[in-house]
């Protein structure tokens, strides 16, 4: 039957997604960049009390490139049926971060004891999905080859505020040869729900980045003379907005410890 | 300077948009399908008290194909700077509809006297934009040629509910030859913020449509033997959800009387 969603969950992917989440529940999944999860959509998690959720939803709506929403849960619900059957957001991520008044206070393996009836969960698209698309098309990514984190930078570009949520656009940078940069624009434009097309390429100073060798987050990655830096809106942007807004309580995924869904990356392509 | 938006407003378009809105303000713009507005993005308007706005925002987030959000205003604000400078949502549409408890009670030319500090405005992408893209690529649309409204149908496909907002997916139908249907998929896929790709093509019974000759809204349009019906998610969907939710007060555009923005349709293309 036709669904209002643009895609149906594939049985094989649902089976693999459920198995991976079970491993996280059992405490035996260390990180979500495991090879058997590479083609599955992974999501950044943000959980907020309902009092803050409306403004955060508006913040995401106004800043779809850094904050592309894959799904928003019902108040109190720890399921996200849009992204997979049987998801339990309290247990299905390998590790969580708990923030009180903007301060990191704990990094537990589950958040069962903290869950509240007024919690609203946000699943935000992650660059893993578009990197999968780039790698699948034969575009090499240096930080992947070197086993490093991608380099991320705070820019001087403000996001659009919503209530207390505001802050600079944070971007990730990948150095590419010109032909690959052009192809990367084409490929990632097809994936608007996982950051989409780059926001900038070339001179980093134009967006307020002083030194590519000193990222604000992640690891520095060299840019060769025949390459240009290509910048994508980054999921650290909403994390920075959350840190600035200092909600009384907030739960997020820990870095490298995302929600593995039952969707396959290729299903997110618009064309 | 780089903006978090994927596009900047062009001075010429801003000038034309402002002039057209001034004509609406002055009561001399009858309908927004005027030739000098064809390349400008037009938006369906929904204004709700803040108490209902959070759920409606979530409804749109969950149903992006029938309810693609172009912008959401601040509480009380009648400006929408994301869509154009100097927009005054109280006066800039040729005609409004006012709904109380789900019943249409008035169709005024402005809503200045009704505006409240807790009103939240939603601007929703409209099929005019993707029809512009289809026509620009040489794909003829019969209802346009015949000067009729597009044929629209309630389907048996449920949208995803959010609070009291729920209801069936409503679709618009355009008959196309197979080659044009394929090209139309390609073209409209580039425009996810104005309904995007079709949701169905071929047998109308598969989505619960009994008779193409009897649309639920708009005018019947013939489907020739060498054509297939192509169905897009339609902006009447949120209107049906609003009618079902029966908010105490709601203001919308009147049919054919949308908000003319300063954006150009081609700027909405993702690729």
Image (tube, coloured by chain):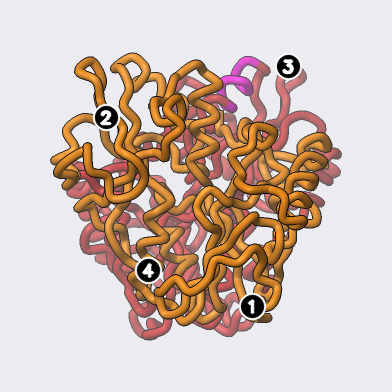
Chain colours: A orange, B red
What is the distance, in whole Å, between disc 4 and disc 3 at their CAs? Answer: 59 Å
- What residue is at 60 percent from the left and 80 percent from the top? B247
Q: Secondary structure at mark 1?
A: helix
Discs 4 and 3 carry the same chain letter: no
Q: Which contiguous range is marked in magenta? A: B179-185
- Examine the rendering and report whether any part of residue B212 can be seen: no
Categorize mark 4 by other alpha carbons within 10 Å: few (<14), some (14-19), many (20+).
many
Q: Which residue is mark 1?
A: A114
Q: Which residue is mark 4?
A: A243
What is the distance, in whole Å, between disc 1 and disc 2 at their CAs? Answer: 42 Å
Establish if B214 lies above or below A246.
above
Establish if B98 lies above or below B44.
below
Discs 3 and 1 carry the same chain letter: no
Disc 2 and disc 3 in contact, CB within 8 angstroms: no
Residue A229 - label: 2
What is the distance, in whole Å, between disc 1 and disc 4 at their CAs? Answer: 19 Å
Categorize mark 3 by other alpha carbons within 10 Å: few (<14), some (14-19), many (20+).
few
Establish if A49 lies above or below B19.
below
Q: How many labels, in total?
A: 4
């Amino acid at each position: 039957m036709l669904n209002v969603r643009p895609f149906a969950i594939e049985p094989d992917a649902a089976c693999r997604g459920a198995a991976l989440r079970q491993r996280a529940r059992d405490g035996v999944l260390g990180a979500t960049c495991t090879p058997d999860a590479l083609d599955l959509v992974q999501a950044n998690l943000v959980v907020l009390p309902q009092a803050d959720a409306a403004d955060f939803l508006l913040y995401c709506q106004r800043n779809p490139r850094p904050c592309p929403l894959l799904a928003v849960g019902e108040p109190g619900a720890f399921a996200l049926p849009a992204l997979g059957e049987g998801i339990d957001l309290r247990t299905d991520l390998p590790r969580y971060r708990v923030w009180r008044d903007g301060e990191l206070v704990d990094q537990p393996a589950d958040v069962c004891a903290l869950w509240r009836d007024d919690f609203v969960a946000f699943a935000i698209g992650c660059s893993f999905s578009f990197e999968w698309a780039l790698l699948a098309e034969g575009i090499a990514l240096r930080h992947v080859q070197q086993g490093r984190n991608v380099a991320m930078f705070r820019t001087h570009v403000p996001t659009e505020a919503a209530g207390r949520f505001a802050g600079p656009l944070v971007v990730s940078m990948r150095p590419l040869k010109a032909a690959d940069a052009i192809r990367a624009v084409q490929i990632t434009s097809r994936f608007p729900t996982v950051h989409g097309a780059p926001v900038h390429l070339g001179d980093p100073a134009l967006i307020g980045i002083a030194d590519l060798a000193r990222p604000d987050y992640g690891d520095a990655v060299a840019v060769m003379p025949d390459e240009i830096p290509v910048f994508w809106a980054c999921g650290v942007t909403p994390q920075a907005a959350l840190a600035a807004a200092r909600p009384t309580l907030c739960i997020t995924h820990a870095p490298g410890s995302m929600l593995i869904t039952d969707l396959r990356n290729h299903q997110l392509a618009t064309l």
